[in-house]
Image (cartoon, rainbow, N blue to C red):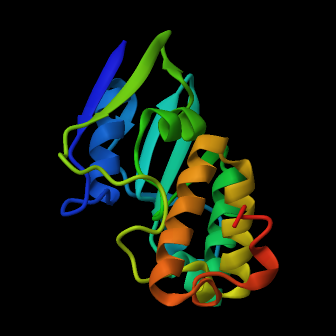
């Protein structure tokens, strides 16, 4: 078994660096420090694309993006993300986008990266005394704030998640609604889809 210990919670939330560190510990023998990849695209000067995290798994190149709220609220950013993903996939990368409203747990690791690495089960252990569940817990950005492309992306991600993670997200939306009203958290037409 591979156990990765993280420290992420109410005062110490998950971020790109913590995700990179956890993945480096799991995929240490194939982890890359390269953050720019040359691909045939006009996204950036000199055809380079910045990638948050890269490594290889079973000879498959993996590009991991830790996507903060701005990847959901800005239409132009959403369009650039789509083009970037397509360009990387054309270069044989598997692209994994880890959203800001998710925490790194054994369940989310399994969903995004697979349950095992080289035949060993990966377990994530959070040592923070108050770990956060998945969802919109310590953020001011809610689905109501997302641009149309960002909202569509969120809904598609939600649909693909295991039910335990979906439930955590739904609970977080309900908790936010207690503070500001559900109509200020997510559009009414999506309440049923999000089990609200």
Q: Nearer the viewer, residue 185 or 56?
A: 185
Tell me which corner region of the image, top left, top right, bottom left or bottom right, holds residue 112: top right
Residue 47 vertical placement versus 180 (above, below)? above
Residue 94 lies left or right of residue 33; in this view the side is right
Identify the residue at image location x=49%, y=61%.
Answer: 135
Residue 44 vertical placement versus 157 (above, below)? below
x, y percent for residue 57: 52, 28
Identify the residue at image location x=27%, y=60%.
Answer: 13
How many callouts does the rendering have? 0
The quarter of the rendered structure image containing the N terminus is top left
x, y percent for residue 60: 59, 32
Residue 119 visible at all: yes
The quarter of the rendered structure image containing the C terminus is bottom right
Q: Nearer the viewer, residue 54 or 188?
A: 188
Residue 90 lies left or right of residue 113; in this view the side is right
x, y percent for residue 79: 68, 80
């Amino acid at each position: 078994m591979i156990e990765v210990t993280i420290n992420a919670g109410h005062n110490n939330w998950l971020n790109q660096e913590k995700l990179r560190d956890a993945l480096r510990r799991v995929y240490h023998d194939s982890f890359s420090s390269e953050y720019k990849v040359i691909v045939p695209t006009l996204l950036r000067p000199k055809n380079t694309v910045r990638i948050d995290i890269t490594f290889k798994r079973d000879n498959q190149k993996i590009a991991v993006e830790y996507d903060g709220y701005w990847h959901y609220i800005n239409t132009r950013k959403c369009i650039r993300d789509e083009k970037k993903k397509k360009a990387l996939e054309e270069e044989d990368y598997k692209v994994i986008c880890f959203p800001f409203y998710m925490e790194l747990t054994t369940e989310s690791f399994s969903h995004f990266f697979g349950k095992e690495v080289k035949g060993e089960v990966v377990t994530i252990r959070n040592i923070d005394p108050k770990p956060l569940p998945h969802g919109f817990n310590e953020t001011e950005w809610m689905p109501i704030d997302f641009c149309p492309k960002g909202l569509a992306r969120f809904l598609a991600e939600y649909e693909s998640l295991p039910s335990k993670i979906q439930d955590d997200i739904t609970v977080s939306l309900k908790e936010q609604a207690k503070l500001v009203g559900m109509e200020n958290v997510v559009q009414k037409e999506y309440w049923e889809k999000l089990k609200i």
